[in-house]
Amino acid sequence: MSWQNKIDLGLQQRREAAAYRRRQVNDGANGRWLQTGVQQYLNFSSNDYLGLSQDPAVIAAWQQGAQRYGVGSGGSGHVTGYSLPHAQLEQQLADWLGYPRALLFISGFAANQAVLTALTAADDRILADKLSHASLLEAAAHSPAQLRRFAHNQPDSLQKLLNKPCSGQTLVVTEGVFSMDGDSAPLAAIQQHTAAAGGWLLVDDAHGIGVRGAAGRGSCELQGVKPELLVVTFGKAFGLSGAAVLCQEPVAEYLLQYARHLIYSTAMPPAQACALQAALLRIQQGDDLRQLLQQRITQFRCGAADLPLQLGASETAIQPLLVGDNQQTVALAEQLRTAGLWVTAIRPPTVPPGGARLRITLSAAHQSEDIDRLLEVLYGVSR
Ligand SMILES: Cc1ncc(COP(=O)(O)O)c(C=O)c1O
């Protein structure tokens, strides 16, 4: 098949499945609002769970960092890109989360790719929750290890895989809070099974860090679990972008030798590390924001109980309304948009076939009346 035919066919397949993805230019978005031209929408699709993308102290820290260090890091951390703000942030994260080391990455996607591909060899296996984020499943598929997936949030299914022989090492992979469903992994049982089989556990807590557990330390803290590898990302509750891997000293040193995403990629700007330090401080003192977020979640779930659409079993800021059909989901999202609400239709392959949904995300930046409005419109369009 020629390049032209291959590309035409791929595009046609996406259109026919009502799964064609388009980006929408906006003039600014935060935990509460999204602006396009003169039109302003209430934003229920952002991962800015605590509203920190607009926090004045975080913005000021970025500005001061840029004044002091310029706007770019100038290189990989292995060359000249590792500055004092990076080192300070790594230490602060390690202290806060109770690990000897933290390593910064440019994104969660890069962190997951780096860890899974650098740590595993051909005789190893990666056992991943079936609904793990694409960055984990793709990393596992690209790694030299064998990938097996266990049924979503089912430690028994994991146990069956663990019982099978493996000549190398086992890495079990799951999320703290699942990105498309908002449900939480049973981390204690997963860790128990993993440890009993002599494996290591990696928890990607992109959607739990900052919002779950005491002082926002995330899903692992909430469930009393300490995985060998903890991935936290800064594009959600931190309100910025980037990620860190928390681990033991030798693992950090090993990743510094072998993780290609660290060695061959420009480090995040030092000013961003300054802003992340300010965001971390706000998160550590953020009980007020977490309480506000919890109020919005409770308000939404109580109000949505009688909707004719199925509400996912989620206690978190991610509240999916399951529709199933792609076209119907897109039509609902468009009706919401007409009413001034921004809710993205999530379709396969981001979710399993038949799993199209409205992925509603809530933020401490929302007002109570925003949730009332969302519910009012949802009842109107789903009857
Ligand atoms: C669970 C999970 N892991 C990793 C990522 C990737 O993180 P980043 O956006 O920092 O690349 C995401 C992003 O959506 C995610 O939901």
Image: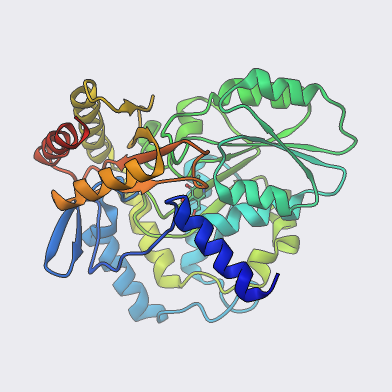
Q: Quadrant of the C terminus?
A: top left
- Name the residue located 54 percent from the left edge and 40 percent from the top edge: 98
Q: Is residue 127 left or right of residue 95?
A: right
Q: Position of residue 26 (x, y in %)?
A: 26, 67
- The answer, for residue 107, to whether it is visible in the render is no
Q: Residue furthest right?
A: 167
Q: Is residue 240 left or right of residue 176?
A: left
The mark tally for this picture is 0
Q: Quadrant of the N terminus?
A: bottom right
The one nearer the camera, 50 or 356, is 356
Q: Is residue 215 above or below residue 153?
A: below
- Name the residue located 68 percent from the left edge and 25 percent from the top edge: 158
Q: Is residue 241 left or right of residue 157?
A: left
The one nearer the camera, 229 or 327, is 327
- The answer, for residue 23, to whether it is visible in the render is yes
Q: Position of residue 112 (x, y in %)?
A: 61, 52
Tell me which corner region of the image, top left, top right, bottom left or bottom right, holds residue 235. bottom left
- Name the residue located 22 percent from the left edge and 69 percent from the top edge: 27
Q: Is residue 75 above or below residue 114?
A: below
Q: Residue furthest left?
A: 369
Q: Position of residue 44 (x, y in %)?
A: 25, 46
Q: Is residue 120 left or right of residue 62?
A: right
Q: Position of residue 128 (x, y in %)?
A: 65, 36
Tell me which corner region of the image, top left, top right, bottom left or bottom right, holds residue 151. top right
